[in-house]
Image (tube, grey):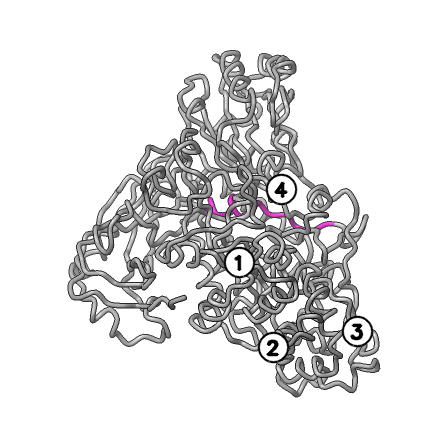
Amino acid sequence: MTFRSTLAVLAAFAMPILAQNGQFPDCASGPLASNKVCDTSLDPWTRAMALVEAMTLQEKIANSEAESPGIQRLGLPKYTWWNEALHGVARSRGVSFKQNGEFSYATSFPQPITMGAAFDMDLVEGFANVTSTEARAFNNAGQAGLTYWTPNINPYRDPRWGRGMEVPSEDAFFMSTYVKHLIPTMQGGQHADPYFKLVATCKHYAGYDIENWQGNKRYGFDAKITQQDLRDYHLLPFQTCARDVNAQSIMCAYNAVNGVPTCADDWLMNKLLRTHWNWTEEQQYVTSDCDSLNNVFQDHRYKGMNAAQVAAETLKAGCDLDCGDFWPRNLGQAYNQGLFDIKTLDDSIARRFAAMVRLGYFDPKADVPYRQIGWSSVATPEARALALRAATEGLVLLKNNGALPLEKPGGAIKAVAVVGPLAAATTQMQGNYFGIPQKIVSPQDGFKAAGYTVSTGRGCDVGCSGTGQFNEALNAARQADAVIYVGGIDVSVEAEDKDRNDITWPGQQLALIKQLGAAATDKPFIVVHLGTMLDSTAIVQDDNVDALIWGGYPGQDGGTAIANIVSGVSAPAGRLPVTQYPGSYTRDVKMTDMNLRPGQGNPGRTYKWYTGTPVFEFGHGLHYTNFSLTFDPDHIGDLPATFNTAELVSQESEELYRDLYPFTSIPVKVTNDGEVASDFVVLAFLKGEYGPEPYPKKRLVAFTRFHDVAPGGTATASLDINVGTIARGDEKGDLVLFPGKYSIVLDIDDQDVWEFTIEGENELLDSWPAR
């Protein structure tokens, strides 16, 4: 989501980025004081429209872009709509950090892919609360805006995607649950009244998950997606954002879907989003991705339209804000040619300023509680503790032959070698779209702080193109009591505008790991994999590698979290939020093949459809103890064995939509049979042959995370399941509840099974709108 010309600068953050959000309107004595936008007794739409009506056509057009210049004669300050907070307040066009002192840092959480591995929605809400509070503090200090372009909710369809770190999972149900907890907390309530805390933006709408793969660039890519896959997968998180949790903003994407660029797609933005999902509150608006309106003209060459025609087409299709200068350059000509009416433009601008009214932008500071938040609420001890918790909960133990946890310092393990390309990683653990934390703890520093004597040696960089520096890592390993290799990939390999061609470990990293293992046969050897998914088959099969941990991008306290898990201060309980495919997968299917279901030249995508053998399954994760998981025997017998489709959809419910009607609550019980207190994640999957073929292998329908289950202790919970969760989309995209024989299984190894039957006729839950 960057201008092409500034992509490298924003990624490197080599220079301060000047925010334009340092001034609030003066509604007391400035020119705006006489405009009804400052009249707090009026409703937001009336106030916003009063401001719009005071603008000239030229002023409206000038302020149609994300870096709005404001209107000096009206007393309307300039404002940058582009602010970032993917995993903490982040440097961006609208957010700047001071060089030192107050507002020179903020809390930097792990990337969503790592937080997703925690499967902890309380954690997600905590992150959203901290980040939105810090965003408000930055705004009150003139360092940031109020409109944030987060979260990224495109499911992680293909492991080569350069932006996979930005999303929490490959599973659309999990993604929907994630935003269900994230958005209301971040915005200060689902229907915050009178003020929203900030505006969250669900992006990228829709079908966006290709950056630049073998010449297929996001700017002009046409994603061919079936209505079934749109319904069940690509659009499910957006339905939750728009229809169910009232996200205030949606971002259309660079790509086209089925021949229509998303930012020019009336069906996506008006028919589906605004009409079908009832996303019609007066302050809800659509923003383009940066330069994506120009892409409709320049890259897609949509319908052979000229620039003025494209400007009008995107406005009429439902876009309200241009992250770029395409509208300012072309809307005037489009209007002069009669290509749109002024009401369309006025409504578009009014929606955005109604959002600003709901944020308290035009109201007296004393009347807006969020305007009172200051520096004392930034990077608090509680926020730092939550960032560490997020990193710790998101680490996943993939392999362990008993070497972990290591003895704590002072025992047999006194000196450890922390080696590898990412052993000293700091900002590399943040990934992309990050802010400046007060302190970043590298893996090496994490082990030092834990009390170990640490020797180091990188061995090679992430690309690891040669073996010339291997000895520095090997020498450190020979002198230590235990060896921890920290490697994998970072944003030099995967990033926005940079997809991968394969999912193998870069360069000679596996060779370095093998040599380290041979040098450490008499001592524990642990591999820590940072970055998104790689084929770790060689590491799994190497008997000299005692343990393997995946950490993704663990953020400011990644080093502490890694050291705590390895040393046993914390017990691992994370689960993979994605499938780890074998390296051959990238040769089996083109990234541009959007089909999820297996077919010719496609072995299927995600755990639901993949027909091959994964290196590690979605949901895989080991512990330092043994757990047994069952349906709670005291309550599972209370559930009926048979349900009827007609009864399920005709029940009395407060829910407006049939798919949200309750189906049942399943009681689960977990017992810690080992000797280490630990968290435990419960995963419940639905199986059955019902609805259109082919059938998914299984589907995640419920999950929860138990905390700190004591040795010998038990924990119980009831997992709620909605009718829509067990339904499926048909070939037309209609959501249907099908009769059939079903089963719900616990965990990836089917630790317990509950079988039930649904009788009756097919029941339509939601009719997919035709294009």
Tell me the CA gap for discs 2 and 1. Answer: 20 Å
Tag shown at residue 71: 3
Task: Check disc 1 and report the residue beneath it.
Answer: 261
Give the image location of residue 562, x and y in percent: 55, 34
**Badge 3, how many Cα within 10 Å: few under 14, some, many 20+?**
some
**Badge 4, how many Cα within 10 Å: few under 14, some, many 20+?**
many
Give the image location of residue 388, x and y in percent: 58, 44
Tell me the CA gap for discs 3 and 1. Answer: 32 Å
Task: Check disc 4 and report the residue beneath it.
Answer: 430
Span highlighted in magenta in the image = 105-118
Tell me the CA gap for discs 4 and 2. Answer: 41 Å
**In screen coordinates, is 398 left or right of 183?**
left
Give the image location of residue 440, x and y in percent: 67, 39
Q: Earlier in the sequence, mark 4 or mark 2?
A: 2
Amino acid bearing label 2:
Thr
Amino acid bearing label 4:
Gln
Q: Which of marks 3 and 1 is nearer the N terminus?
A: 3
SS at badge 2:
helix
SS at badge 1:
strand
Task: Check disc 2 and report the residue beneath it.
Answer: 344
